[in-house]
């Protein structure tokens, strides 16, 4: 999130997805489009959120039934900050998944907070 609580990037972080079959860390580490994609550790990679969502719509709109997004916020944020970030996140998901083009995402979206 930027200073106005608008979402622009997805931060991988942690080891949450690295242990699954093949994991995502290896891909993120090698992805030169991802900020922090250093070829060694993908956990620090940042990927533009629009690119991720457009890829889902363009390549997988009919094949991914459920997209799960875990919306992390900062402990230091006020309730108003969290509300602004949540609204930004929701608006981004609707705009880029369901209203991106005439061929929008056909699946469901589950958001964790």
Image (spheres, rainbow, N blue to C red):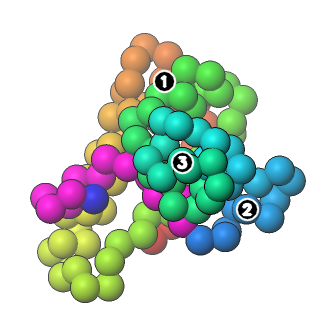
Residue drawn at 21 percent across, 57 percent down: 2
Check residue 84 in the rendering and tell me which mark sits there, or answer none: none
Residue at the right extreme, as displayed: 21
Q: Secondary structure at mark 2?
A: loop
Q: Which residue is mark 3?
A: 37
Residue drawn at 70 percent across, 62 percent down: 17
Residue 3: percent from the left, percent from the top? 15, 62
Given residues 47 and 107, the one toward you in this image is 47
Residue 109: percent from the left, percent from the top? 54, 48
Precedes in sequence: disc 2 or disc 3: 2
Image marks 1 and 2: residues in contact by CB distance under 8 Å: no
CA gap, disc 2 and disc 3:
14 Å
Query: Of tags 3 and 1, which is closer to the observer?
Result: 3
Check residue 104 in the rendering and tell me which mark sits there, or answer none: 1
Main secondary structure of the magenta stretch: loop
Residue 28: percent from the left, percent from the top? 61, 47
Q: Relative to residue 2, is residue 64 depicted above or below?
A: above
Residue drawn at 63 percent across, 48 percent down: 39
Given residues 87 and 2, the one toward you in this image is 2
Is residue 66 visible in this depiction of the protein? no
Precedes in sequence: disc 3 or disc 1: 3
Neighbour class for label 1 at 10 Å: few (<14), some, many (≥20)? some
Given residues 25 and 9, the one toward you in this image is 25
Q: Secondary structure at mark 1?
A: loop
Part of the protein shown in magenta: 2-13
Query: Of tags 2 and 3, which is closer to the observer?
Result: 3
The quadrant the C terminus occupies is bottom left
């Amino acid at each position: 999130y930027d200073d106005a609580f608008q979402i622009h990037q997805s931060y991988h972080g942690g080891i949450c997805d690295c242990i699954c079959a093949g994991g995502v860390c290896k891909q993120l580490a090698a992805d030169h489009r991802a900020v922090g994609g250093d070829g060694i550790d993908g956990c620090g990679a940042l990927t533009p959120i629009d690119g991720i969502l457009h890829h889902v719509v363009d390549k997988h709109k009919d094949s991914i039934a459920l997209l799960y997004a875990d919306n992390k916020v900062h402990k230091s944020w006020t309730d108003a900050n969290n509300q602004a970030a949540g609204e930004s996140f929701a608006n981004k998901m609707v705009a880029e998944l369901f209203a991106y083009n005439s061929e929008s995402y056909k699946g469901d979206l589950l958001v964790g907070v």
